Image: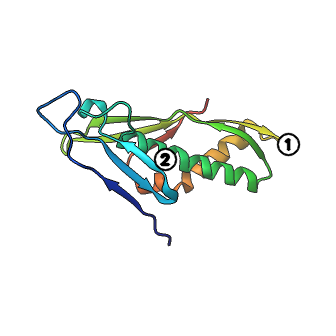
Amino acid sequence: MSVHHSAISWQRAPHETDPTTYSRNHRVSLNGGQQVNASAAVEFKGDSRCSDPEQLLISAVSSCHMLFFLAIAEIQGYQVESYEDDPVGYLESNGKRGMEMTRIVLSPSATFGGDKVPDEKAISRIHANAHKNCFIRNSITTEVTIDRV
């Protein structure tokens, strides 16, 4: 088991464009001293200059998948030179409980170097293993699919 921590801080301030409500802007403090300026999504009166929880969730899933992909590729003797993803999350009504992130689509692309380069079948297997082992994906009920570029 490992324990992970972050801190959230918010202070009342007027909303920049709607005087009838409050600012949703807040700060997320992560280990190592990183500070993330966060807010609600724009549709929920958030600040477009800040990260929103929906973006952070899809980024966490994508990052976790990538880290497993890199580790599995290395174990199998492949040298990944670069990796990119453009994940998309779909926030939709679930009918009974309100809104939820119903699905996340990962669109990873990797380039390889070195003497041993995987074929498409091997790359698909690495993605499948990364998908199966990703801690974050295993922690949510949202459907996560991989649409390779």
Q: CA distance from mark 1 to mark 2?
A: 28 Å
Residue type (three-letter) at the residue carrying disc 2: Val
Coordinates of residue 44 in the picture (x, y in percent): 24, 34
Q: Quadrant of residue 82?
A: top right
In this view, the residue in front, 28 or 42, is: 28
Q: Residues within 10 Å of mark 2 (few under 14, many from 20)?
A: many
Residue behind mark 2: 61
Q: Residue at x 47, y 51 (%)?
A: 137
* x and y, in percent, of residue 99 in the image: 25, 40
Rendered location of residue 68, percent (x, y): 62, 52
Viewer-nearest residue: 128 or 75: 75
Identify which residue is drawn at 88% across, 43% down: 115
Residue depicted at x 85% and y 44%:
116
Q: In the image as oriented, which residue stretches furthest toward the right?
A: 115
Mark number, residue 114: 1
Identify the secondary structure beneath mark 2.
Answer: helix
Report x, y in % for residue 3: 46, 69
Q: In what quadrant of the picture does the C terminus appear?
A: top right
Q: Nearer the viewer, residue 25 or 98?
A: 25
**Disc marking residue 144:** none
Q: Quadrant of residue 40?
A: top left
